[in-house]
């Protein structure tokens, strides 16, 4: 089963993305900030990361290098 890591500060996005992917074998894991995203990435290697560019106080483009390095 493939894992999609959704990094978005809007909680309602996780069910929406899950619904869009329900015909695939992918499971969606939701993180609301960089710290949670790094913790989820440690639990398992996601095949795809969907990153919101506007994460409240964090900027998606600014945290992208840290995600890549991790």
Image (cartoon, rainbow, N blue to C red):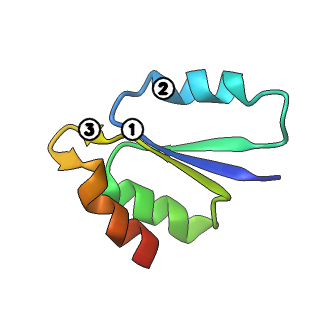
Up/down of 5 relative to 43, above or below:
above
Query: Along the line of sight, which residue is nearer the eye, 59 or 6?
Result: 59
Indicate which disc, 2 or 3, sits on the residue closer to the N terminus.
2
Q: Which residue is mark 1?
A: 8
Give the numbered dot on residue 13.
Answer: 2
> In which quadrant of the rendered view does residue 70 lie?
bottom left
Disc 2 on helix, strand or loop? Answer: helix
Q: Give coordinates of residue 34: x percent, y percent.
A: 32, 57
| Residue 70 in view | no
Q: Name the residue located 34 percent from the left edge and 69 percent from the top edge.
A: 65
Quarter location, residue 36 = bottom left
Q: Residue at x 42, y 65 (%)?
A: 38
- In the rendered structure, which disc, 1 or 3, sits on the residue that comes first in sequence? 1
Q: Nearer the viewer, mark 1 or mark 3?
A: 3
Q: Are there few (<14), some (14-19), or many (20+) residues within 10 Å of tag 2?
A: some
Q: CA distance from mark 2 to mark 3?
A: 13 Å
SS at mark 3? strand
Residue that badge 3 annotates: 54
Cβ atoms at labels 2 and 3 below 8 Å apart: no
Front position in the image: 58 or 27: 58
User: Dot 1 surroundings within 10 Å: few (below 14), some, or many (20 or more)?
Assistant: many
């Amino acid at each position: 089963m493939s894992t999609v890591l959704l990094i978005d500060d809007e909680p309602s996005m996780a069910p929406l993305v899950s619904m869009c992917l329900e015909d695939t074998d992918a499971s969606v894991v939701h993180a609301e900030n960089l710290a949670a995203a790094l913790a989820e990435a440690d639990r398992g290697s996601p095949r795809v990361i969907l990153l919101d560019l506007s994460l409240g106080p964090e900027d998606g483009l600014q945290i992208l290098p840290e995600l890549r390095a991790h």
